[in-house]
Amino acid sequence: MKNAHPLVQTEALGLHYGRKPAFLDVSLAVPRGAITAVIGPSGCGKSSFLACINRLSDLLPRCRVEGSVRIGETEVFDPGTDVVALRRRVGMIFQKPNPFPLSIRRNLELPLKEHGMRGRAERDAVIERTLTDVGLWQEVHDRLDASALGLSGGQQQRLCLARALALEPEVVLLDEPCSALDPISSGVVEDLIVSLRGRYTVVVVTHNLAQARRIADRVAFFWVQDGAGRLIEEGEADQVFGDPRDELTAAYVGGARG
Amino acid sequence: MVDHEMWGSTPARGRTDRLVAAVVWLAATVVTAVFLWILADLLRHGAGQISWTFLTAAPASAGRAGGIGPILVSTAWILAVCLAVALPLGLGTAVLLAELTSAEDAFGRLVRRSLDVLAGVPSIVFGLFGNALFCVYLGLGFSILSGGLTLACMVLPILIRSAEEGLRAVPDEYRLGGAALGLSRGKILLHLLLPAAVPGLIVGVVLGFGRAIAETAALIFTSGYVDRMPGSVHDSGRALSIHIYDLGVNIPGGETNAYATALVLVAILLLTNTAASLLGDRLRGRHAES
């Protein structure tokens, strides 16, 4: 796949917690419509990197960001950027499923209302469509007003995905979306991620190499050097796994390190 | 079979376990017994007096006879003023402390330190302060308003700290998840954080209510001890606790009605505590369901 039309582009991006850098100097182009996997060991700044793309970094305590992120024409860290609009364009799924302690319907309704969808019929249509998209409609259509906390872990994660997709984002960020799930649920969610290809630009952080190999079009490999995470290598998934240019990458994907 | 002798200490450990259990049970029993003793004492001396007439009639002969109708009304008004002022102020401050300042923020630390000091100030000091500020300086005189406002100052630290604890106990996932969906801070607070913090808020209100309804010293100098039915919040009004104090200390022959009034006070406390905990359970349940 060619990388001629990146949708998300970072330039010399770095993030510090207090004085401690989480990752430094990451310049990465994420192609539109593809699945980009960010891999690497724990503590190499993968999740912090993800949090810069939707500016969730604003909420992290004592966090400072340098460099730039662009999504299309939008300069993400420009002071004039509308963060609410940005986060509507960039959806995010967390490691631990985080449905709100509300009904299944309210979980989906709350963000839709916030982003100005006033009509009830319109909202109900979106709710049915997105729940169908994540394969949850059959399972929950007769208990939409029951608590979302009553769903299984896998169902909760799919609900969170539906909640993000309901806002029709361009970019979907997934922060180790399967690592808190049992193997079967994990497989279901993984298939869903694959189904997003083409319609959304997906960035998925994972430390499951087998998963990255199965689902990714492109791979970015992070590693800790001199006390900070750095982007060691990025490229087509086949190339990074099959013919890595860097020794560290070769050792990591070969299972010798990490 | 396990050879107990091999481990040597088993019988000794058994003795220690039993000793610890006995001490713990004894402590719990003593605490409960003290409460039951007080309750039994109040019931023995006061229960005979309690009647609908006692609850509604005006006191007669300086409280030796008659009832506590106006005193119940004054107490209700003082508490209403207190909570109406303290709740919004307390909630607002708690939101500021929990959501808008970090743990190491200098301003947040200053506010928290002040609250801790305020919580430890003896109530008589609050009474003198309330008298100077509300009764004299602001010209409210001895009135239900002055008393309620003074009590509000007193319960604010309790309310704020428990509301703050409640908010801090809400998992960060809701804040991050809400923000990631583009929800504004206000919406996150209103729809996710406050509902989840309700149990903490209720605890704060119950504690504050308990402190306020039992307060005597702060009210003597502010709401006064006129035992007539108040016409408005600008009238002086006698609270239950002051009535008990007056009957017990100043009025020879007032003991029986003092006991009866104390019984009413304890009953109100028990009722509100029970109601609040039931309400808390209900809200928690509904919050998880809807």
Image (spheres, coloured by chain):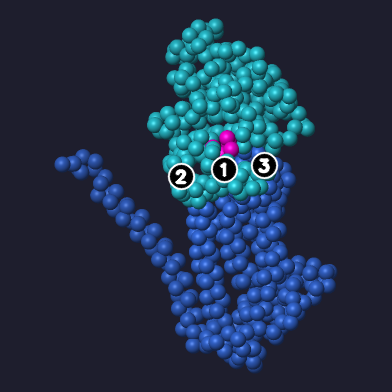
Chain colours: A cyan, B blue
Front: mark 2 or 1 = 1
- The residue that mark 1 highlights is A125
The three-letter amino acid code for the residue at tag 1 is Ala
Q: Is residue A4 above or below residue B287?
A: above
Q: Is residue B21 visible?
A: yes
Q: Quadrant of the N terminus of chain A?
A: top right
Separation of marks 3 and 1 at Cα, in angstroms: 16 Å
Q: Residues within 10 Å of mark 1 (few under 14, many from 20)?
A: few
Q: Is residue B187 above or below residue B60?
A: above
To which chain does the residue with label 2 belong?
Answer: A
Front: mark 3 or 1 = 1
Label 3 with label 2: CB-CB less than 8 Å:
no
Return the x and y of residue B89 as percentages of the image width and height: 71, 58
Residue B76 versus residue A99: which sits nearer the camera? Answer: A99
Residue at the image point whose x is 42% and y is 63% from the top: B28
Separation of marks 2 and 1 at Cα, in angstroms: 15 Å
- The residue that mark 2 highlights is A140
Return the x and y of residue A90 as percentages of the image width and height: 63, 31
- The residue that mark 3 highlights is A115
User: Magenta residues, as a range?
Assistant: A162-166
Q: Quadrant of residue B144?
A: bottom right
Determine whether, in the image, residue A69 is placed left or right of residue A183. Answer: right
Residue at the image point whose x is 62% and y is 14% from the top: A3
